[in-house]
Image (tube, grey):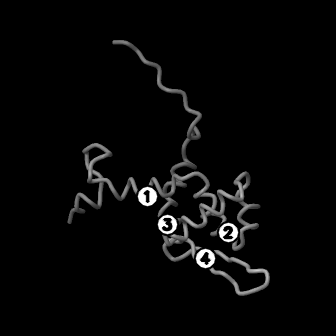
Amino acid sequence: MHASPSAQCTERTIDDSACPNLLGALELVGRRWTGGILAAAAHGARRHGEFRTMVGGISDRLLTQRLKELAAEGLIERTVMPTTPVQVRYRLTADGQALLKALQPLVQWMARRSVPVGTAQPPAHHPG
């Protein structure tokens, strides 16, 4: 049984309509700080301050924005606690957990690389 063109990329160009799932997934997880926020949630971060501590370098404004985006995508659940002052708690949804599980092969691939991404020199061009 073969997957339909909409479920897999083919030998066509990456911009082709055959690749919307791949492009959507890469766009979602490729946003700056998103991976760190999801990992922090998986490692127990529940409150804004915990995320800020675990995801070093992110601004409060951008953290708030990314948490809202991830909640809108259904990857993180945002719960407002009726306390004084109001507290907000976050947790991974089942979809968020499934995404992290789906990313594990990519993480393992990266760990096996002898050259970290971004440090490799381009191959020498040999005119021929």
Mark 2 and mark 3 residues within 8 Å of each other at the beta carbon: no
Q: Which residue is mark 4?
A: 78
Badge 4: residue crowd in 10 Å (few <14, some 14–19, many ≥20): many
1 or 2: mark nearer the eye = 1
Looking at the image, residue 53 lies above or below residue 128:
below
Quadrant for the C terminus, please: top left
Q: Which residue is mark 2?
A: 43
Q: Which residue is mark 3?
A: 99
Kind of residue indicated by mark 2: His
Task: Classify mark 1: helix, strand or loop.
Answer: helix
- Upstream in sequence: badge 1 or badge 2: 1
**Residue 89 quadrant:** bottom right
- The mark found on residue 25 in the picture is 1
Q: Tell which of 122 and 36 is nearer to you.
A: 36
Kind of residue indicated by mark 4: Arg
**Residue 119 quadrant:** top right
4 or 1: mark nearer the eye = 4
Task: Classify mark 2: helix, strand or loop.
Answer: loop
How far apart in space, not on screen, are marks 4 and 1 (Cα)? Answer: 22 Å
- Upstream in sequence: badge 4 or badge 1: 1
Instruction: Tell me which residue sits at (53%, 71%) in the image.
Output: 97
Determine the residue located farthest toward the left in the rendered image.
Answer: 1
Instruction: Tell me which residue sits at (63%, 80%) in the image.
Output: 79
Q: Position of residue 105 (x, y in %)?
A: 49, 58
Kind of residue indicated by mark 3: Leu
Q: Tell which of 108 and 34 is nearer to you.
A: 34
3 or 4: mark nearer the eye = 4
Instruction: Tell me which residue sits at (71%, 64%) in the image.
Output: 51
Q: Position of residue 94 (x, y in %)?
A: 51, 77
**Side (left or right) of 112 relative to 16:** right
Mark 1 and mark 2 residues within 8 Å of each other at the beta carbon: no
How far apart in space, not on screen, are marks 2 and 4 (Cα)? Answer: 16 Å
